[in-house]
Image (cartoon, grey):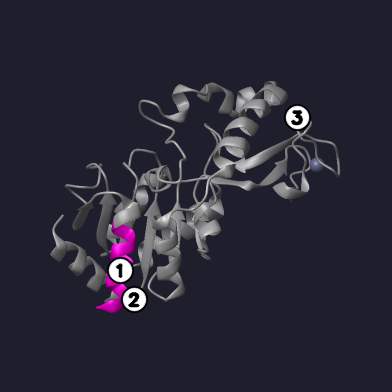
């Protein structure tokens, strides 16, 4: 790990007008959240077909058993790690303006990040399939599945983006705007393979931003997009980077 690269990256963040972070599954692995893709990933244990809108509509009770197990029991218990906390600390000190995440685990918010765009939605709220009202998850019990709308009795769906579902328009618009306006974009824990979220760093780059990548392995961004590639664990490198931003 070249220390001067980390020092340079820290200086860029310190001097930037707007810095954003784009994060993926890799940042939550150290919190015990397994990635979805790849060997040993969640999709090797859970059938992704059950998370298609069609399957959900046909048999919401069956889909919900898996949704509860995966998103609320398994992922819901995870705690933010040092990487999430480092980003929250950067924001608190005015060095980071927004986090755009592909994760639905809510760990950025739990760490204290205030401006978070959840590209693939959130488990913290649900929407009625019938009357389209949204409800905070904590107001809805998951003892009986599927959970039903307290107003009209329709089936509730978590506000996570299912396969074959479009990205919520407002989140996409805001995230793209953030990418256009930033001058530094941190890319953390993502291989850059999930469309259309993976475009965010490209939008930033094309708008003139410097891309600082933190990943354990090389990604789709490493050679053609990233200006700095800090290779290693986000839980180690991000706190170090955050510290140097503040002390330089
Ligand atoms: Zn309803």
| Upstream in sequence: badge 1 or badge 3 | 3
Instruction: Report if residue 29 lies within the magenta region.
Output: no
Is 239 a magenta residue? yes
Which residue lies under the disc numbered 3?
Answer: 145
Residue occupying image coordinates x 13% and y 58%: 2
Callout 1 crowding tier (Cα within 10 Å): few <14, some 14–19, many ≥20 = many
Secondary structure at badge 3 equals: loop
Quadrant in the picture for the C terminus:
bottom left
Residue occupying image coordinates x 34% and y 62%: 239
Query: Which residue matches tag 2?
Result: 17
- Magenta-drawn stretch, dominant element (helix, strand or loop): helix
In what element is the residue under mark 1?
loop
Left or right, 248 with reference to 59: left
Residue range (magenta): 237-248
Q: Are marks 3 and 2 in contact (CB under 8 Å)?
A: no
- Label 3 Cα neighbours within 10 Å, binned few <14 / some 14-19 / many ≥20: some
Residue 136 shows in this picture: no
Tell us which disc is closer to us: 1 or 3: 3
Which residue position holds label 1? 183
**First-in-chain label (1 vs 2):** 2
Q: Earlier in the sequence, mark 3 or mark 2?
A: 2
Residues at circles 1 and 2 in contact by the CB criterion of under 8 Å: yes
């Amino acid at each position: 790990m070249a220390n001067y690269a980390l020092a340079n990256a820290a200086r860029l963040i310190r001097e930037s007008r707007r810095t954003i972070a784009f994060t993926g599954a890799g940042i939550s692995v150290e919190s015990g959240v397994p990635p979805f893709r790849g060997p040993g990933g969640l999709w090797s244990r859970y059938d992704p077909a059950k998370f298609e809108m069609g399957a959900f509509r046909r048999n919401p009770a069956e889909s919900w058993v898996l949704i509860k197990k995966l998103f609320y029991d398994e992922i819901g218990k995870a705690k933010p790690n040092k990487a999430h906390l480092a980003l929250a600390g950067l924001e608190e000190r005015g060095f980071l303006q927004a986090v755009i995440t592909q994760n639905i685990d809510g760990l950025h918010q739990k760490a204290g990040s205030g401006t978070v765009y959840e590209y693939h939605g959130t488990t913290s709220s649900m929407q009625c399939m019938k009357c389209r009202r949204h409800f905070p998850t904590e107001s809805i019990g998951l003892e009986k599945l599927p959970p039903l709308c307290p107003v009209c009795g329709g089936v509730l769906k978590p506000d996570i983006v299912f396969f074959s579902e479009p990205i919520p328009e407002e989140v996409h618009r805001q995230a793209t705007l953030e990418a256009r306006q930033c001058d530094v974009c941190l890319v953390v824990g993502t291989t850059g393979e999930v469309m259309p979220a993976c475009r965010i760093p490209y939008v930033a780059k094309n708008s003139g931003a410097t891309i600082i990548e933190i990943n354990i392995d090389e990604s789709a961004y490493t050679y053609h997009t990233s200006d700095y590639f800090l290779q290693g664990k986000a839980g180690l490198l991000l706190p170090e980077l955050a510290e140097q931003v503040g002390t330089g």
